[in-house]
Amino acid sequence: MNATLIGALLGAILAWAALEHGLGGFLLMALFMAVGALASRTVRGRVDMRAILDALTGRRSSS
């Protein structure tokens, strides 16, 4: 799948959530999608969670 098709699919899913469940459902689904994407990239080894946690706790900076 190319990026345009994936973006359109995600937009349709979020639009459905907004129409079916209101703003709260939209925000909750967007949060779950972001968490799922982060988990997927972590499992595939594309994201280093230790570095993210260190940056969030102030142990290390991105610069």
Image (spheres, rainbow, N blue to C red):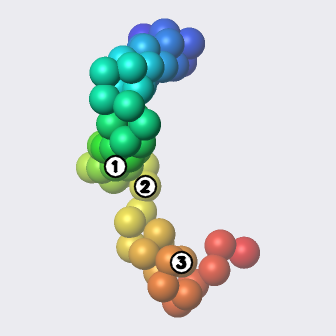
Mark 3 falls on what kind of element? helix
- Please give the residue where the numbered disc 2 appears in the rendered image: 47
N-term-proximal mark, 3 vs 1:
1
The picture places residue 43, in percent across and down from the top left corner, at 27, 49
- In the rendered structure, are the residues bearing label 3 and label 1 in contact, judged by CB atoms less than 8 Å apart? no
Compared to residue 44, the image places residue 58 above or below, namely below
**Which image quadrant: the N terminus?**
top left
- In the rendered structure, are the residues bearing label 3 and label 2 in contact, judged by CB atoms less than 8 Å apart? no
Report how far apart the C-alphas of labels 3 and 2 lie in the structure. 13 Å
Residue at image coords 33%, 36%: 25
At label 3, which amino acid type do we have?
Answer: Ala
At label 2, which amino acid type do we have?
Answer: Val
- Please give the residue where the numbered disc 3 appears in the rendered image: 55
- Please give the residue where the numbered disc 1 appears in the rendered image: 35
Q: Is residue 33 visible?
A: no
Q: Nearer the viewer, mark 1 or mark 2?
A: 1
| Front residue (pair 43, 25) | 25
Q: Nearer the viewer, mark 3 or mark 2?
A: 3
| Front residue (pair 18, 42) | 18
Mark 2 falls on what kind of element? loop
| Dot 2 alpha-carbon crowd within 10 angstroms: few under 14, some 14 to 19, many 20 or more | some
Compared to residue 12, the image places residue 25 above or below, namely below
Count of numbered badges drawn on the protein: 3
Residue 40 appears left or right of 2: left
- In the rendered structure, are the residues bearing label 1 and label 2 in contact, judged by CB atoms less than 8 Å apart? no
N-term-proximal mark, 1 vs 2:
1
The picture places residue 8, in percent across and down from the top left corner, at 50, 13
Compared to residue 62, the image places residue 21 above or below, namely above
